Image (cartoon, rainbow, N blue to C red):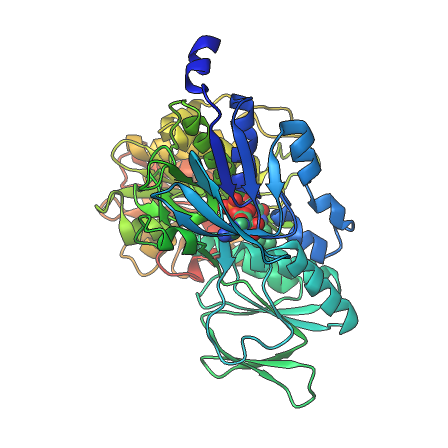
């Protein structure tokens, strides 16, 4: 596009009004200014701040971030001076008159109500924490965490009430990040989670190490149970949280972190299309069902890049990118949103968990495009950097891929170091529609402090590619336990003695070639070792000699996590 072409789109003085001034709204407005010096751009923000770091709130509660001002990424003055964008704080947009292309606005401080006209309207109202109508939900001491004032109130409560015990309802990202920060402040935390695992978007065997780590840090986990009611204890200070199963937990404060629902009131009342999941329905260009109205961020329902399903993904990355795309389209560029992958990372005390693409749970439940998909998964536990260099920490990686062509469908990882960079690399591969063969060939950074010459991402690709090519098919513990196959443990006798699968036969890898005659040719052999590497060598050697052998992916290190879970 030449400068002249740009000028064509920017003729006149379009009025771009943006509802919501944080991730999606602020990035949309700023991008619009970079594309047009002529547009009039106004952001309406209900709250007292524009462009604040809601992702930093748990760390403000935990005093990791000590100065509240650090949470403010920009001020109205900065928007005015730097971008010539007007920001109206404490100003709520109450209605959209689509026929007249006007919005009705209320200054929440003065009560003044007025109207503004638009050429393009961008809805970026975000989402609101879910507060189910449970008995006692409005008791003092029950918090949600979404805004700076929310975090300020929590901090004040913690200090003034000298909080010792807290209940966090919900074991998702916000629940876990806040748990860590409450513990940092010396508070003893119980997490109540309705599902049998924490971190609902990931698979249970990747959640299992997080659960162990939470327990090791003194956090009590109460899984597979929902909250039924909250009551004030007779002491007048503490709250009793009773679950559906009848368990009761007394505490000084509660954080409700059971998810968010898209803010769609404005859109609904204006008659915009709402999707099946309750988000504002938008199409590729982030346009709603009204061609003059765009919507971005937590409030919208967009396509999942892997499964093709409509999806609600309340994450800052998509909100920012969508804001930028909406601005591009409004100002005449042909930008398209590619869909969401749910790429996310969370730190829980000393471990990091990250994921991208479809989980196995999702594939089992919904398939791809509503059709069942043939997929396989591999588990590996490489060091985050060369094992010979001091300080290598294992990462557990699960890679899920289509068996037909090796297309990467999803990946999850958990460990102390180097987790997110592996998931980021795979996220990009997924977005490019890459296969496990591409991961095999990916050229990634290597020096001993950072990785291995065969990076964990390459290794994941190699193991998966071996499966797709039929060179090294894998089995999983659930296939092995109780199966008629011979279970072969190829670790050293000392390791075998420390614990092994009941009924397994121990032939260490180093003696396997001499002892192959001890193994049956008419029965499948499932080999395992500590992490799946020696048993891969064993399974390859056996297959080359005509045995029907598979490697149990992830070895003993995956056994514990998989045994605790179903369907892995
Ligand atoms: P928001 O950023 O929520 O902004 C919406 C704004 O619109 C709000 O300020 C609201 O006041 C305003 N508004 C709503 N209705 C109106 C109206 N009618 N008139 C005027 N203004 C209105 N995501 C990550 O990717 N990584 C993280 O680590 C992460 N951590 C998080 C931690 C916490 C505690 C929270 C709460 C969220 C976290 N998120 C994280 C999610 C991320 O912050 C959101 O996905 C992102 O902010 C969504 O952007 P948005 O623009 O859609 O909405």
Between 4 and 274, the one nearer to me in the picture: 4
Kindly indicate the quadrant of the structure image that contains residue 269.
bottom left
Name the residue: 60% across, 30% down.
451
Whole-percent x, y for residue 501 in the image: 43, 58
Between 66 and 333, the one nearer to me in the picture: 333
Whole-percent x, y for residue 122 in the image: 45, 39
Say above or below: 257 vs 461. Answer: below
Name the residue: 30% across, 33% down.
468
Between 565 and 38, the one nearer to me in the picture: 38
Say above or below: 53 vs 483. Answer: above
Name the residue: 45% across, 68% down.
194
In the image: residue 531, left or right of residue 73: left
Between 394 and 192, the one nearer to me in the picture: 192
Asked whether residue 481 is in view, the answer is yes
Whole-percent x, y for residue 293 in the image: 39, 39
Name the residue: 74% across, 44% down.
70
Please state, as top left, top right, bottom left or bottom right, where the C terminus lies in the image.
bottom left
Asked whether residue 531 is in view, the answer is no
């Amino acid at each position: 596009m030449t400068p002249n072409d740009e000028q064509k789109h920017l003729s006149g003085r379009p009025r771009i009004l943006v509802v919501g001034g944080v991730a999606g709204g602020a990035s949309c407005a700023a991008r619009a200014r970079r594309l047009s010096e002529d547009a009039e751009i106004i952001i309406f923000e209900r709250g007292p701040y524009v462009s604040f770091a809601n992702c930093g709130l748990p760390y403000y509660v935990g005093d990791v971030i000590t100065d509240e001002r650090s949470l403010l990424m920009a001020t109205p003055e900065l928007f005015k001076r730097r971008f010539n964008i007007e920001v109206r704080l404490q100003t709520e947009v109450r209605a959209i008159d689509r026929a007249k292309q006007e919005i009705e606005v209320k200054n929440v401080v003065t009560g003044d109500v007025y109207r503004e006209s638009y050429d393009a309207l961008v809805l970026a109202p975000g989402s609101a924490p879910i507060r189910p109508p449970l008995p006692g939900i409005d008791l003092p001491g029950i918090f949600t965490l979404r805004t700076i004032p929310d975090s300020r109130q929590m901090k004040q409560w913690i200090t003034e009430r000298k909080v010792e015990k807290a209940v966090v309802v919900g074991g998702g990202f916000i629940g876990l990040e806040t748990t860590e920060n409450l513990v940092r402040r010396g508070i003893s935390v119980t997490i109540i989670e309705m599902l049998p695992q924490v971190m609902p978007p990931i698979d249970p065997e990747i959640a299992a190490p997080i659960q162990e780590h939470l327990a090791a840090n003194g956090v009590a986990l109460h899984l597979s149970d929902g909250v039924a009611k909250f009551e004030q204890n007779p002491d007048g200070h503490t709250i009793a949280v009773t679950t559906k199963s009848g368990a009761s937990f007394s505490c000084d404060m509660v954080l409700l972190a059971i998810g968010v629902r898209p803010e769609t009131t404005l859109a609904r009342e204006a008659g915009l299309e709402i999707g099946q999941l309750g988000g504002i329905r938008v199409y590729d260009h982030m346009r709603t069902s009204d061609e003059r109205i765009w919507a971005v961020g937590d409030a919208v329902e967009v396509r999942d890049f892997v499964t093709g399903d409509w999806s609600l993904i309340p994450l800052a990355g998509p909100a920012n990118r969508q804001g930028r795309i909406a601005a591009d389209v409004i100002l005449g560029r042909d930008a398209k949103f590619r869909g969401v992958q749910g790429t996310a990372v969370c730190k829980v005390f000393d471990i990091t968990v990250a994921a991208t693409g479809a989980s196995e749970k999702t594939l089992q439940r919904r398939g791809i495009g509503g059709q069942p998909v043939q997929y396989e998964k591999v588990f590996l536990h490489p060091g985050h950097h060369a094992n010979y260099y001091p300080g290598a920490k294992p990462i557990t990686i699960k890679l899920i891929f289509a068996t037909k062509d090796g297309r990467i469908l999803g990946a999850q990882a958990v460990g102390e170091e180097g987790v997110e960079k592996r998931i980021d690399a795979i996220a990009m591969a997924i977005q490019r529609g890459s296969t496990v063969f591409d991961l095999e060939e990916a050229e990634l950074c290597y020096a001993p402090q950072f990785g291995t010459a065969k990076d964990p991402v390459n290794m994941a690709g190699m193991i998966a590619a071996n499966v797709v090519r039929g060179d090294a098919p894998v089995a999983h513990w659930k296939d092995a336990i109780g199966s008629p196959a011979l279970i072969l443990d190829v670790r050293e006798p000392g390791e075998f003695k420390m614990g092994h699968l009941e009924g397994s036969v121990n032939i260490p890898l180093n003696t396997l070639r001499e002892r192959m005659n001890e193994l049956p040719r008419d029965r499948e052999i499932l080999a395992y070792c500590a992490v799946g590497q020696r048993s891969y060598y064993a399974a390859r050697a056996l297959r080359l000699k005509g045995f029907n052998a598979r490697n149990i992916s992830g070895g003993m290190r995956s056994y514990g996590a998989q045994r605790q879970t179903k369907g892995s």
